[in-house]
Structure formats: structure tokens, C-alpha cells
Amino acid sequence: MTGPETPAVRAVGSVTAVIVADDAAPDAATLTVWGEALAELFGDVELVIVANGLPSAVALELDALCGGIPDLTIHFLADRIDHDAAVLVGLDTALGDWVLLGEPRPERLPVLHALVTEARQGYQVLAAVGGSGGRRRSADNWLASGYFWLYRRLTGRTILRPPPVLRLYSRAAALFIAGSADGEMLLKAGYVAGGLPAHVAHYAGLATDAPRARTWRATVSKATRELLSATTIPLRLAALIALTSGLLSLLYSLYVVAVYLLKPDVLPGWTTLSLQISGMMFLFSLLFALMAEYVLGIYRGLAPRRRYVITRELRSPKRRHATRLNVVGEDGSFHLGMSDEVSR
């Protein structure tokens, strides 16, 4: 696809647009244009900025920004966390029927119209993927390809590359991702879960976001954490290694007994010492395997919960529908306010 046209379409329900501020406050004019465009497509609009551990100067800029833009909410995080984790904070606190992720850029408005059109077809997860982003170094690209291949082999999920530029989730899909242990990787996947139909659209002329600079240490730490949280195979592998070690210890005990019976010039004490070592290794391996299975059972029984601290929340005093309340309509859909007919 080369680029969608802008159809006149209006989606039923409300939308929460989540924007993560990592280094600087978003541009006020861009946010205003983005909010007005969303107001034309959805019945109610909420703009949410997740201030990711920003310094005091930027926090003051956000304070001033909140007073001039309608339907804006700002969540200030106590400490800086990973960008994808901050996005999950926005998903967890969103109130709309739909949640929109992506940097607010005017040139992306036609793509946004296309996503809303697809949402009316019944899709719960929609992603717009642009052309290739900034060129990575060949070594980084090779390592990333190998990592995503391993992730797909272990979990069965295909990670979109380059990552989606715009993502539109239903409230059910947003809550599922926010509550999943591998939510950070689900943000980059085209398929989320059964019962949540997904649609991925590719636009050759759509510019992708610039890759975020990370140190090698942070990259390896994030990759390891996401891989371990997405699958229990590493823990299963540890239990299998322990059982294999126990089996080898048992076989070694049989070998020691055979040597003692068949070889006449065995050094005194060798048989006793070898049997003691092999017996202890067998018991330790068996206990480690049982502990791994027990930890696996606990892991499966506990719901994943991320820890984050929102120190302050700001809400804009300006509302597009100032006289309306937060209600659920007759069809069961949530709106940030009652309908215009009722409020009159």
C-alpha cells in the first residue's frame, strides 16, 4: 500500500491516545491538531501523557501544557523506566473504548483514518507499519534478527519489523496486554491472543520512528528479561539439565561399582569417595529439578503485576463536553460523558 485516503468515518465510542514523554514535552500545537482529528473520528477523546521520570524543567513545561489543551491527562512517574514499560502504564490507566499508541504527527492522520475504518470491521488489534527506519549497523541488525527468530521459535509470536508506527487497541486488547507478563513484546507483535482479531497494514511511504538509543548493557538486559517473561522454556530446560545430571551421576555410580568388582588394583578409598560424590550429585540434581518444577507451578499460578509509582496526576480544566459525565451507554460501550441528547 502506498498511502490511504482520508474517508469521512466516525467510530462509535471513546478513545485514549497514549503518548510517552521520555526527554521533552510534546509540542502543544501538534497535540491540539491530534486531539481535534481524534474528536472527528470518536465520540469522546482523552489525551494521556506518561511523563517518564522527567526533570523538573520539563515537568514545569507539562504543567503549563496541561492548562491549555482540552481533555489532557498527565501521569508523572517517580522514576524513569523503559519506554515500552511506560506505554504499558498508559494502557493500564486508559479509560476509553479504544487506545491509540503512536507519536502525534500530522502526516499520520490519513493512516489514522484508515485504522478507524478497519476497526469498524470488527478488528480488536490494528497496527500500521511503515517503511524501513534508520539503518542499523550490520552487527546490530544481525543480532536483532537472531533474537527475534529465537523469540518466535520459543513463543510462536512474530515480531513486526520495523515496529508499528501507529497501534489501535480495543479496551479488551489493551487490558490483556497491560496484564501480560510479556506485554512489552506484545506491543511489537501483530497477533496478540485468541478472540482478539488483528489486522496489520503496511504503508511504504510511512516514515517510522527513529530507533531509541540504548547501551549494550541495557539492550541485553531488556532482551533477556523479555525472553524469560514470555516463556517457561528456560526453566523447563534447567529442570531437564538437572535430571540429566542426576542420571549421569547414577550411571557413574554403576561404573564405580563395576570398576571395584572387575579391577583388582583399585586404590583404597577411591570407590567409597566416588560413590559418595556421585550419590550427593544425584540427590542435589533431583532436588533442583523438583524445585524448578515447584517454581514453575508458582509462576503459572500468580498473575503478573508490574510495579510503577505515579507520583502526580494532572487533568486539564478544559473539556470538549464539560457538562457530561462518565457513563456506560445502553449498548454497553463506555463513553467519557453522556450523550448530547441526554445532556441537553
Image (tube, rainbow, N blue to C red):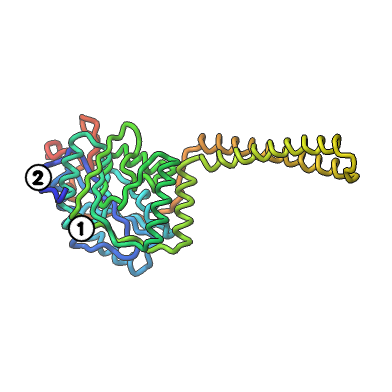
Neighbor class of circle 1 (other Cα within 10 Å; few <14, some 14-19, many 20+) is few
Viewed as shown, does residue 185 lie left or right of 273? left
* Residue, far bottom: 57
Which residue position is annotated with label 2? 7
Q: In this view of the protein, which residue sits in the foreground, 135 or 16?
A: 135
**Looking at the rendered structure, which numbered label has been put on residue 267?**
none
- Please provide percent x and percent y for residue 97: 25, 40
Which residue position is annotated with label 1? 105
Q: For the residues marked 1 and 2, what is the alpha-carbon distance in whole angstroms?
A: 18 Å
Residue sitting at x 29%, y 51%: 18
- Please provide percent x and percent y for residue 205: 18, 55
Q: Answer whether residue 265 is visible to the viewer in this image.
A: yes
Contact? badges 1 and 2 (CB < 8 Å): no
Secondary structure of the residue carrying numbered label 2: loop
- Please provide percent x and percent y for residue 92: 36, 45
- Please provide percent x and percent y for residue 229: 47, 45
The image quadrant of residue 336 is top left
